[in-house]
Image (cartoon, rainbow, N blue to C red):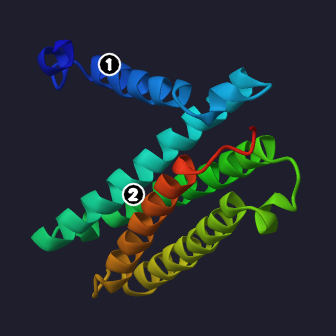
Amino acid sequence: MLGLYLLERYRYMDAFWVGAILFVKSLNSHAIATNTPSLTVGLNFIHLLFVALWLAGLFYTLILWKKGLAHTFIPTFSKMALLSIVVPTVSGSIYAWLLAPILSALWTTEWGYWMIAKLVVVSGIFVIGALIRDHFKKNASLQDASFLYFDASLAITIVIIVGLLTQLSSLLN
């Protein structure tokens, strides 16, 4: 209830509120059940923060596209999008390695199969992002939203895969 009163009144309170939600989410995950919870909770927090920035920016770009205003936002978001994909890739890789330090878990467990699927989809996001940046640099605009829609469909696919990964038994057990 407090959030409803405070949000959108104070910028610092908004940032604190988002940070608190991400921190509590990080505490309520497999990250807390490791031998190094301070490291894994921190990695999970960073991972969630940058993924949230990427998803919010991507879907905001789609909303702006429908209004014909995306061309002014895409250059700014493009820089952030690259960072918000690289950081979760690095933090997620470290986090996954800490959860499953045996590489063979990738091809011997159901968790590993879904992790490989996630890596394939993330690779697709890197490719689509590079195509969008290249197209925008050459044309100073994005004539067609198909790349954005494909990127959004890959984002939704990752969210579904992550849902499956979180429902699988942890490799820690």
Amino acid on which disc 1 is placed? Tyr
Q: Residue at x 19, y 64 (%)?
A: 64
**Quarter occupied by the N terminus:** top left
Return the x and y of residue 39 as percentages of the image width and height. 73, 27
Q: In this rendering, is residue 163 above or below 72?
A: above
Mark 2 lies on a secondary structure that is: helix
- The residue indicated by pointer 2 is 76
Is 39 or 167 nearer to us in this picture?
167
Residue at 35% over, 75% down: 148
Q: Which residue lies at the image location 14% right of the left edge and 72% below the top edge?
A: 66
Q: Residue 95 lies in what quarter of the image?
A: top right
What amino acid is found at the position of numbered circle 2 in the picture? Thr
**Which tag, 2 or 1, sits closer to the chain's start?**
1
Q: Callout 2: 10 Å neighbours few (<14), some, many (20+)?
A: few
Please give the residue where the numbered disc 1 appears in the rendered image.
Answer: 12
User: Which image quarter holds the C terminus?
Assistant: top right
Residue at the top extreme, as displayed: 2
Q: Position of residue 10 (x, y in %)?
A: 22, 18
Q: Is residue 152 above or below residue 171?
A: below
Q: Left or right? Give the position of 2 relative to 90.
A: left
Above or below 40: residue 65 = below
Pointers 2 and 1 in contact (C-beta within 8 Å): no
Q: Residues within 10 Å of mark 1 (few under 14, many from 20)?
A: few
